[in-house]
Image (spheres, helix red, strand yellow):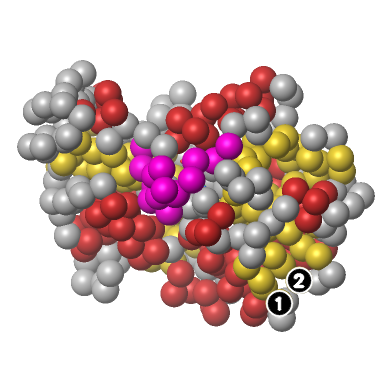
Amino acid sequence: MAFDQTRWVWRNGDIIPWMEANTHVSAHALHYGSGVFEGMRCYETASGSAVFQLNAHLDRLYNSASVYGMEIPYQRIELAEAICEVIERNEFSSCYVRPLCYYGSSTLGVHPAKCPVEVVILTWPWAAYLGTESIEKGVRVTVSPWLKFHSQMMPTTAKACGQYLNSILAVRDAVRRGFDEALLLNTDGHIAEGSGENLFIVRDGRLVTNDERHSILLGVTREVVMQIARDLGYRVETGALRLDDLLNADEAFFTGTAAEVTPIREVDGVTINDGQRGPVTRQIQEVFFSATSGRDSRYRHWLHPVAQAVGMNY
Ligand code: PPE
């Protein structure tokens, strides 16, 4: 189980044993998916553990909550400190961090009305999302028969629990048919994103990715990779991505907190270029992992030291 090494969970202001971090079956979120969450990674660096892009993830958490009219009953600084505290209590040097805010028990009317907003923070060790080999060898993806929902149905830029049912349909179908991951098209027929990752293609030395107009979550890793690519001297463009663009790309890769930077080697049996991780992808991965490990001083401000939480600016 993913949580074998997790001893403590932060819940509504307290650190409690993992075994006791339960919720009632009448919780609104269990019935309707009425919650918002984040996924961050804490990395080991030479000067101690640090949460990567903590501020950007907290920004998105509060924005996701406001989309659904949910008031998170904790200040940013409290959640930032809580995240660091629960990582330290679990004695993790690196881990995945999952803050979740959800409507608890009060009513089961669809309108959450007076349901309390419960806040929990789970941490656990999580190796490469799509398998350790995938970072070097790349993954095989399939275009999902399921479309990514349109932002007029639910804003794709919010990271809300219920909307992941769309991703679950897509990834289950992909895995059942022998692929590593699903790629969802949007209602316009353009590429949206993976079930849990954003997409980049490389063509003639330029990087191209899509944006919120194409029904995607605006990934924190996406933003990081755009910055790294620009700093490496590449042109980065945002615009619609067609399936043809992907199939004819020189290189393609996924980005995400869990997936980090994962090459795509094949789409429905068609290899991207020669099916090997491309040089631009590799270069970006190298800088990305230097940034997450604190080895690249240019990006040290992206790391939030776990041990020095108190008194920092959030
Ligand atoms: N799109 C989707 C739909 C998505 O779930 C993620 C994160 C991303 C893009 C990339 O966003 P970011 O992590 O900020 O770069 N998906 C999480 C995977 C687990 C999950 O599905 O939840 C993650 O990477 O943490």
Q: Where residue 60 sits: x, y (%)?
A: 36, 58
Q: Secondary structure at mark 1?
A: strand
- Position of residue 312 relative to residue 3, above or below, is below
- Position of residue 75 relative to residue 88, above or below, is below
Amino acid bearing label 2: Arg
Residues at badges 1 and 2 in contact (C-beta under 8 Å)? yes
Q: Secondary structure at mark 2?
A: strand
Bin the neighbour count of mark 1 within 10 Å (Cα to Cα): few under 14, some 14-19, many 20 and up.
Answer: some
Q: Which residue: 17% across, 21% down?
A: 26
Find residue 50 and report its image quarter: bottom left
Q: Where residue 9 sits: x, y (%)?
A: 26, 37
Find residue 296 and report its image quarter: bottom right
Q: Which residue: 54% across, 27% down?
A: 169
Give the Cα separation between the discs numbered 1 and 2: 5 Å
For label 2, the residue is: 206
Q: Which residue: 32% across, 32% down?
A: 33
- Position of residue 289 relative to residue 7, above or below, is below
User: Does residue 265 appear in this view?
Assistant: yes
Residues in magenta, as a range: 147-161
- Comparing 292 with 134, the one in front is 134
- Comparing 249 with 224, the one in front is 249
**Prevailing secondary structure of the magenta residues:** loop
For label 1, the residue is: 235
